[in-house]
């Protein structure tokens, strides 16, 4: 019995460590964009409402984290030109705010839901990715609480946790795929707007394989746990 309790305690430490690393990794890659997007969205929403009330509606939207492939140079001001230290910055990522006349059939809601990427579909995908990220955090707390309860009761975890872990893995992959698709759509739009300028937009589909691998490992963990649970149930029936 003591060995069983020790095993569950080690399992608790492993699960908590794993989920904390996963949460920190997702937060590090996604939260800065969400917080910045919230502030920009509030400002754009105020501008859209003001233009609509003035009788001259305009479509305003942002294109964030657009990657530049030609590393265009950027001139610095305020630096002593006589200094021996030479600094040559290069533009690799840019954020664009596009302000253009709205179409004749545009509505305030349509303009508001196009504030990200200029398309309601991109706005919807951004919201779904945010909801998936929040769901991952909630499921992590549920699983950790369930493991703690299992240790106190000295029993294995119930089958629901297998589904929770599978869901976390699927949502992790979905969140990264959604983020990559949003970035690709924004880059494609930025390439159209900046055509003919000195900036060349990289329109390749880029994805974080680290996050995808993490999601696959979570699903793999769920399947290993499911096999172990099935073997435990079969052993009880045999006894």
Image (cartoon, rainbow, N blue to C red):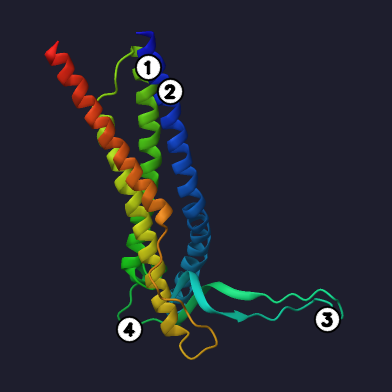
N-term-proximal mark, 3 vs 1: 3
Rendered residue at 41%/84% (across/down) = 192
Which residue ends up furthest to the top in the rendered image? 1
Is 16 located above or below residue 65 in the figure? Answer: above
Direction from residue 237 to residue 79 in the image, left or right: right
Q: What element carries label 4?
A: loop
Q: Is mark 1 on a helix, strand or loop?
A: helix
Discs 1/4, front: 1
Rendered residue at 32%/37% (across/down) = 221
Direction from residue 119 to residue 77 in the image, left or right: right
Please tell me in which quadrant of the rendered image residue 149 appears. top left
CA separation in Å, label 4 and label 2 = 63 Å
Percent of width and height locating residue 97: 50, 74
Which residue ends up furthest to the left in the rendered image? 238
Residue 10's disc number: 2
Toward the viewer: 143 or 70? 70
Rendered residue at 40%/62% (across/down) = 207
N-term-proximal mark, 2 vs 3: 2
Q: Is mark 3 on a helix, strand or loop?
A: loop
N-term-proximal mark, 4 vs 2: 2
CA separation in Å, label 3 and label 1 = 67 Å
Please tell me in which quadrant of the rendered image residue 227 appears. top left
N-term-proximal mark, 4 vs 3: 3
Is 152 located above or below residue 18 in the figure? Answer: above
């Amino acid at each position: 019995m003591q060995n069983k309790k020790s095993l569950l305690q080690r399992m608790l430490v492993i699960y908590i460590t794993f989920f904390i690393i996963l949460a920190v990794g997702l937060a590090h890659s996604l939260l800065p964009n969400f917080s910045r997007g919230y502030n920009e969205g509030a400002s754009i929403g105020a501008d859209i409402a003001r233009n609509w009330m003035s009788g001259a509606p305009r479509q305003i939207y942002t294109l964030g984290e657009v990657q530049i492939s030609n590393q265009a140079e950027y001139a610095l001001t305020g630096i002593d030109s006589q200094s021996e230290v030479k600094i040559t910055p290069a533009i690799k990522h840019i954020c664009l705010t596009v302000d253009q006349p709205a179409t004749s059939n545009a509505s305030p809601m349509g303009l508001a839901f196009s504030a990200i990427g200029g398309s309601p579909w991109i706005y919807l995908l951004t919201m779904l990715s945010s909801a998936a990220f929040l769901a991952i955090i909630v499921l992590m707390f549920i699983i950790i609480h369930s493991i703690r309860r299992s240790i106190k009761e000295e029993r294995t975890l119930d089958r629901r946790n297998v589904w929770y872990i599978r869901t976390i893995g699927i949502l992790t992959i979905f969140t990264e795929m959604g983020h990559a698709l949003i970035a690709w759509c924004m880059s494609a739009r930025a390439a159209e707007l900046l055509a003919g300028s000195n900036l060349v937009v990289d329109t390749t589909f880029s994805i974080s394989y680290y996050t995808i691998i993490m999601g696959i490992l979570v699903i793999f963990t769920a399947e290993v746990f499911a096999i172990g649970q099935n073997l435990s149930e079969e052993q009880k029936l045999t006894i």
